[in-house]
Amino acid sequence: MEPEIAIRTFIYGSCVSRDSFEYFDGDRYALSAYVARQSLISAFGKAGDPGVDLSKLTSPFQRRIVQEDVASGLSARLRAKARQVDLLLWDLVDERLGVYIQDDGGVVTRSVELLTAQRESNRRVPGRLVAFDSREHRELWSVAVGRWLALLRELDLLERTVLLAPAWAERTTEGRRTPASFGISAKQANRATAGYVTTVRRQCRIRVIEIGQDLARAAEGHKWGIAPFHYDAAVYRSIASAVEDLEVAS
């Protein structure tokens, strides 16, 4: 009997998708590629200039994701992998810090890694900040979503795409209130993110997995530290189970 071919999975998103994937059945799912820290606005905008010394980032992964972001590399990466993608996981957490719009029209995601390089090199990222959930950000993002969905249709990946949208956890597994992330509380993020998910749903029928606030809990012992989007194992298992159920039904 021939072994079952693994479900080749492309992740475009944050630690939410990547950490959830660790709870998928390893005999059935294989990671094809991971594109992180790249806002849709940046991905479908003009390539930008980081303006800071990326060599200050000690992790090759961190340097690569910033370089890929400033080059607006999502489309090229997905096109190169499209024929080897059975499932595409997408989440919106990396939108939370906004983008820089530069004088020449270039766009750069305001990621944690970029801010770290800015601090370590004592140089400022060029551009005007467009904050998450501002009117301008939502308008730019809506246009970018249209382009993203058009790309997914072109590559025959729309039906293979799942948007993961668990609520940011307001409480930890110990019942304590979660800290804000760069000034954004879980309550603020959940209110804002709901509008972005609605924008996606208005533009197309797409599979969305949501975990409500009643179930969302942040793990106090999470490997990345306490944050509203660093969940406990129960949340990741729920996401993995929901995705696997969708795959069985499709």
Image: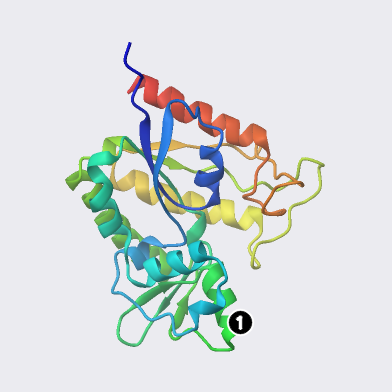
Q: Is residue 182 left or right of residue 207?
A: right
Q: Is residue 70 left or right of residue 222?
A: left
Within-10-Å neighbours for mark 1: few <14, some 14–19, many 20+: some
Residue at x 31% of width, y 61% of height? 144
Work out which quarter of the rendered image holds the C terminus and state it: top left
Residue lying furthest left = 154
Q: Amino acid at mark 1?
A: Arg
Q: Which residue is mark 1?
A: 119
Viewer-side residue, 139 vs 243? 243
Residue at x 51% of width, y 31% of height? 24
Q: Is residue 200 visible?
A: yes
Viewer-side residue, 45 vs 63? 63
Residue at x 62% of width, y 50% of height? 229
Question: Quadrant of the rendered structure where residue 23 is?
Answer: top right
Q: Secondary structure at mark 1?
A: helix
In the image, is residue 123 above or below residue 176? below
